[in-house]
Image (spheres, coloured by chain):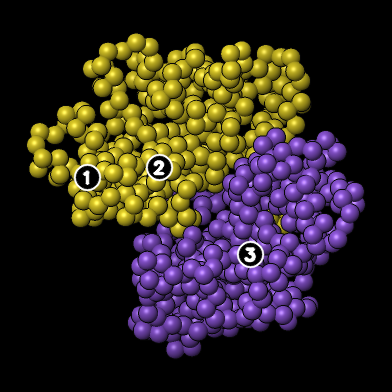
Chain colours: A purple, B yellow
Amino acid sequence: MSKLLEVKDLKVSFNTYNGEVHAVRGVTFDLNKGETLAIVGESGSGKSVTSNAIMRLLPEPHGFIKEGQILLEGVDLAKKSMKEMQKIRGKDISMVFQDPMSSLNPTMKIGNQIMEGLIKHQNMSKTEARKTALELLTLVGIPRPDVRINQYPHQFSGGMRQRVVVAIALACNPKILIADEPTTALDVTIQAQILELMKSIQQKTDSAIIFITHDLGVVANVADRVAVMYAGKIVEIGTVDDIFYNPKHPYTWGLIGSMPTLDSNDEELFAIPGSPPNMLTPPIGDAFAPRNQFALEIDTVMEPPMFKVSDTHYAATWLLHPDAPKIEPPEAVKHRMQGFAQTGTKGGGKR
Amino acid sequence: MTREKLLEVKNLQKHFAVGKKNSIKAVDGVSFDIYKGETFGLVGESGCGKSTTGRTIIRLYDATGGEVKFNGEDVHGKKNKSELLKFNRKMQMIFQDPSSSLNPRMTVLDIIAEGLDVHKLVKNEAERKAKVEELLEAVGLNREHATRFPHEFSGGQRQRIGIARALAVDPEFIIADEPISALDVSIQAQVVNLLKKLQKERGLTYLFIAHDLSMVKYISDRIGVMYMGNLVELAESDELYNNPIHPYTKSLLSAIPLPDPRYERTRKRITYDPTVHGTDGDFELREVVPGHFVRCTAKEFERYQNEQK
């Protein structure tokens, strides 16, 4: 597999009246061709800031990349000028935003919004671009594209609008598609359609997807690999099976335990106590320690490095240190991991 | 089983006028009962009328038709001020967005005590403060929080304030309209655990409106599924999930992604085609299995019953 994107020790900060907010504090990951990487975490964990930094959409100069590299096929995006970035956005990397209502221009016809990128990046003539736009609308499953192409965003429903946004994002066959909570604003049935759409298009075009979400159900559905973010850092990264069936970081335990499954009964949900830290003054040591019932003494003093669990699976928790006491995940979470495994072998045949 | 009915909703309708001639039938004949001490979940896609149902029950909207009976008394219809007060005290609401449902210019103390003042439940300032502090602790906040303003709190804490406000007047029945949709996953579990704890301690009855089906299944005793202003299926929550009968419920259930990659790889989605029911027919809620109601025509009813055997 070839590495398409490498993010190395990315640090992003925002200057505010109260001081510097350390939103992303050293994120490292890479993305291979044709794979889907899901980034999960609570709001404020820095997952959206990471993706905006890759697209260089930070509100500069208040928000800026402090350190680190973003290598797209070996070229550092962090050093590009805004003008150079305009040639990359939409062509090499494109983005699908959370809210389809506000990411489309309400005064422009759908067709023109799709054609915009084609004409700019691929030097198409208007008639060519229109033809491609029609194909794209068919690809994303919008019925009667020849009529719809002349309509405005308000004439579309939420799910249809998100399809249009996906069509725009795909117009120039980007190498990477960043989807920032693309289905959070949509209903479950529409969400399922959009996810299926994105997967089928990925198979056709072999593009890589960075999928940002906080819904673990969606992650299980789309992702090949998962990165769990907390307080501006990746605390655990691995294949989707590593994360769901063999989680090592207590924060991942909490995330998995806090979601009820359909066959969970009356037991209390495993909630993570407290709330995320203030990134104005990031805590010393492990940022998750104050909310972690398994925190060790060292957690308050020193930050844990990434420990290797397997070739694909890494986690940043002192619990993985050879000298650490052996701690099992809480019962509720263990039960859930086993429960998952069972429904898996049954093939979900319950329904 | 002899359970006491707390709330009876009969053929509730709420139509919104669109221009002079047209109207949208947001809720078009919904009937269900809620028993004392239970949690009744209402699920459906956005625009199906679930929130409108909740808001009409509590009289935030006037019903176009139908009846809502609370403890045997009609909720709608003419009432004088004292009757309204008495009724408002028994029924409270928790809203979806904790930042827009709290007045930004009032302190937490005043927000929570507003109900106490309206209903004249406290005699003096000291008693008022003591009651608010007790409520804050009941929902897991500190008594020092009373003097602060809503913007100083996180989303989960604000939702706790909303819950404390609803509890202030000792209601019997609480309508929770998507109380956790705006919160983070880890915080959702905290709030749901809190709601469950309070229900146990105070014997509350909930109407829980949400679109997150796994959470609804977890918290509810019985669930009603709404589609286009109608209740299409109603059953005990386990029964509904293990044995969905209405094709819409089946499709809704098949669309939920579960946090289990192996299951997700094999999940098959069922799409709902409303034309399977035909256009004519006497649609009504019928009891296919005891306690399990499905909206169907007489013909479908026969078929569903045969399938269940």
Determine the residue positioned at 37% across, 17% down: B75
Q: Residues within 10 Å of mark 1 (few under 14, many from 20)?
A: many
Tell me the residue that label 3 is attached to: A38
Q: Residues within 10 Å of mark 2 (few under 14, many from 20)?
A: few
Q: Position of residue B193 (x, y in %)?
A: 39, 50
Tell me the residue that label 2 is attached to: B100
Q: Determine the secondary structure under disc 3.
A: strand
Q: Earlier in the sequence, mark 1 or mark 2?
A: 2
Tell me the residue that label 1 is attached to: B109
Residue B236 vertical position relative to residue B129 in the rendered view, above or below: above
**Residue A11 visible:** yes
Amino acid carrying label 1: it is: Leu
Horizontal relation, residue A286 to residue A217: left or right:
left
Kindly give the residue lying farthest to the top in the view shown.
B78
Instruction: Give whichever of A33, A17 is nearer the camera.
Output: A17
Determine the residue positioned at 56% across, 77% down: A10
Check residue A143 in the rendering and tell me which mark sits there, or answer none: none
Which chain is indicated by disc 3? A
**Residue B293 visible:** no
Which chain is indicated by disc 1? B
Q: Position of residue A188 (x, y in %)?
A: 63, 44
Distance from the alpha carbon under mark 1 to that under mark 2: 17 Å
Circle nearer the viewer, 2 or 3: 2
